[in-house]
Amino acid sequence: MKVSKKESNVYWNPIIETLPMEKLRDLQFMKFKKILEWAYKRSKFHRRLYQEAGLKPGDIKTFEDVAKVPKVEKSMMRDIQRKDPFPYGEALCVPLEEVTEFRQTSGTTGTPIYQPDTWQDWEWWSESWAYLLYAQGYRRTDRVFLPFGYNIFVAFWAGHYAAEKIGCEVVPGGVLDTEARILKIQELRATAMMATPTYVLGMADTARKKLGIDPAKDLTIRKITCAGEPGASIPSTKQRMEEAWGAKVYDHVGATEVGAWGFECTAQPGGLHVNEALFLVQLEDIETGETIEEPGRKGKIIITALDRIAQPCIRFDSKDVAEWSKDPCPCGRTFRLIRGGVVGRADDITKIKGVLLAPAAIEEVVHSIKGLSNEFEVVVTKIGDLDDITLKIEILPEEEKNREAILTQLKDQLRLKTNLGYNIEVHPYNSLPRYEVKAKRFKDLRKKCE
Ligand SMILES: [Zn+2]
């Protein structure tokens, strides 16, 4: 489907989203220089970082020069925080009294990072989400339900405000439990919602088993925006969610310290658009550090938030891995596409029996097999000197009769997609752990075995 650029109801910002590539690069470069200068002048942390590299903002004369600017890693942010101006420390670029928002990272990979934002930053947050929700078909006629416990994490707060900005009606499902949320969705005939893939599938299970409600038939949710896990970019998981809800499911990527930088559009092109109006995303060869412009070559994602001022995010090393798509999107946006979304973090990709494995590849296989439940667990251990990998799964009760065929299919697909052999353990239905928001299905116990 080719959409005419004149149909302004397709884009949140019809001019920016269809700018020719050269003009987009010019805009990004202009904004990059501005934020670099801003951070250099106002943040002791950034100034020290650049001075140590012998770099001044004026040295950045061409777009290619951007790659010379030192990268920032999460661990560097940890070191400067909890100091003056308390609690953000030396990267804060505005007077403390201008900060209106506090959020923090979840701390799954270490001490949480505090994130200050000014009111202007908060407008920017909702603007970035407005681009993505609009691209996913959210309009004034939508009644959007947020089945989410609002708290110190940024997740879905900006989605809430962006939906309001677009003109949707927003229902905050905050402290309600899962059953109450489902009943409220039914009562109000909500048309859209935002949640993690684990929760989207968990809600559908609860609706069917505890309330006798089939979300695809009895509820009116027709689009779901996912975040927090790669599931909506894993084709088999996406399909499970779409079938369970009778809805279109869209992915988005973002992070507390970065912003909402990528989104899927209604064309579902098998990838995510980078919001190139608000972010500069660069891919870098994992070994050599070389900037990757060509499609089909995997690299680490380095992100700059071009307009965020309180605690700037300049060349942030996300540790995520992705590749550019070679085809433009049929939706007509000129924002580049990340092929297949962001399904692996450089940290998550692990070597087992000498083979590189991204846990998302196992999820893709398990969720592609009809007879298996949504739940599974992967445990890697060491027996003597050898890696040993066990996959725990559940067979759906109504599919028990096909047990042998299901297991054969599973083993074949795993071998084909991941190049590894597994010990398969079939667990009784409903016995593997269920997760409320984000699943922890991959357990690498090898370090403990050493
Ligand atoms: Zn598109």
Image (cartoon, grey):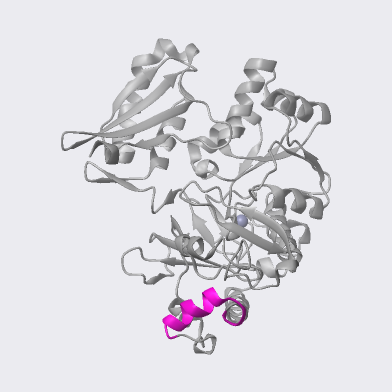
Is residue 249 visible to the viewer in this orientation of the structure?
yes
- When the figure is inspected, residue 99 is found, relative to residue 366, above or below; the finding is below
Q: Quadrant of ligand 1?
A: bottom right
| Visible residue check, residue 261 | no
Residue 296 image point, x, y percent: 40, 60
- Residue 410, position as x, y percentages in the image: 35, 27
Magenta segment includes 343 = no
Residue furthest left as drawn: 385
Residue drawn at 46 percent across, 14 percent down: 399
The residue nearer to you, when weighing 216 against 97, is 97
Picture coordinates of residue 178 (x, y %)? 68, 27
The furthest residue to the top: 401
- Magenta range is 40-54
At a point 49% along the width and 40% down the height, the residue shown is: 235
Give the left or right position of residue 345, taking residue 356 as reference: right
Residue 248: percent from the left, percent from the top?
64, 39
* Residue 82 vs residue 328, the one in the foreground: 82
